[in-house]
Amino acid sequence: MTRWLDADEQQTWRAFLASSRALMETLDRELQRDAGMPHAYYEILVRLSEAPGRSMRMSDLADATGSSRSRLSHAASRLEAAGWVRRDECPSDRRGQLAVLTDDGFAALAAAAPGHVEGVRRHLFDALSPAQVDQLRRISETLAAHLTGS
Amino acid sequence: MTRWLDADEQQTWRAFLASSRALMETLDRELQRDAGMPHAYYEILVRLSEAPGRSMRMSDLADATGSSRSRLSHAASRLEAAGWVRRDECPSDRRGQLAVLTDDGFAALAAAAPGHVEGVRRHLFDALSPAQVDQLRRISETLAAHLTGS
DNA sequence: TCGATTTGGTTGAGCGTTCAACCAAATCGG
DNA sequence: CCGATTTGGTTGAACGCTCAACCAAATCGA
């Protein structure tokens, strides 16, 4: 027996779909226009910039950005072609690869960050009350735990 | 002056990113696996199935599904190739096109719906308390209004 | 009424993602 | 130890989306 959605749940689900899609598309388009990179690549650069030595194992980077290994591998190739990332051998595991943020990559990230952060603030945080922001954090954390759990 | 995110906002934003992406990817993969269609195409079929005559103007359908005209046009071509949608001339506007859900398309949707709805329930609604569901609806509606407004 | 603009929709190239297949190095189990 | 499995990562094809360019029909405005 299918547990169908009632009218309220329908509305919630559709509102969530529409708003999260619109938010991501807006931010992605802004980033593409102003910094010449999609949001997924921005996230990769951010994670690398925060890592010790500005470098991470490919797998760890994939986990951190919530992407498949394949996706990250393709992305790293593009970022490498752009001169923003370099691949190094991993000293402790001969299968491993280290993705390293180059100086050019760091500069590209530094140039992109202010505009993007401003976008996140304008399109997300400015729209919500402090209470709603708090609710959104709890909901998101609950959801993330639920999804990785099952 | 960039209004940077503080630690709490960072956490909220990253949790939202991770959870919404994980949710959509999970549902998309399930739908692709079980029904052979991406979530975007499922949404198109749903909207058509709810419309009078199971048909809609391309532009209205694009608006309803929150997609660009180009995206919808490409999607309609694929759905047409699959035999799930047909294009008809629009009687009132010679530029117009009517996307019409075929019987095969309706059947495909009917076959896909139970599994997908169950997925939405399992991965989203089952994880949240009734209060959180209500909060999520309000947040999403606020956000959607804010995004289409500016 | 006729040129200019707007609206409705399509097209093709380029990009990023997925999926399955694959290879090599590391680890497990008898 | 050595064969089997697992882990780390890459590859290429197929797919869906974006963007810009485009065409045709409708509408605006002088």
Image (cartoon, coloured by chain):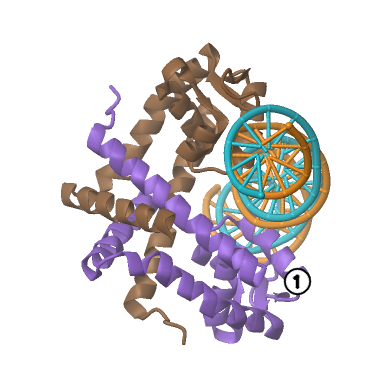
Chain colours: A purple, B brown, C orange, D cyan
Residue drawn at x 46%, y 15% is: B53
Please state the total of marks drawn on the protein image: 1
Q: Quick check: A15 above or below C11?
A: below
**Residue B57 placed where, x, y %?**
54, 28
User: Which sits in the foreground, A105 or A28?
Assistant: A28
Whole-percent x, y for residue A114 in the image: 52, 80
Is residue B1 visible from the viewing direction of this image? yes
Q: Is residue A83 left or right of residue B142?
A: right
Quarter location, residue A35: bottom right
Which kind of residue does numbered mark 1 sit on?
A: Ala
Q: Which one is in front, A33 or B30?
A: A33
In what quadrant of the picture does the N terminus of chain A appear?
A: top left
In the rendered image, the residue lying farthest to the top is B103
* Residue B105 position in % (x across, y down): 53, 18
Near-viewer residue (B131 or A143):
B131
Q: Is residue B141 above or below residue B82?
A: below
Residue drawn at point x = 69 percent, y = 66 percent: A76
Can the viewer see residue A62 in this picture?
no
| Residue at 34%, 69% in the rendered image | A126
Does residue B75 sit above or below A29 in this rendering? above
- Location of residue A137 by image quarter: bottom left
Q: Residues within 10 Å of mark 1 (few under 14, many from 20)?
A: few
Judged from the image, the secondary structure of the residue bearing numbered disc 1 is loop
Residue A34: % across, % down: 62, 71
- Image quarter of residue B11: bottom left
Q: Chain of mark 1?
A: A
Give the side of residue B102 with respect to residue A81, left or right.
left
Nearest the viewer among A139 and B48 is B48
Q: Which residue is mark 1?
A: A82
Is A108 above or below relative to A130?
Answer: below
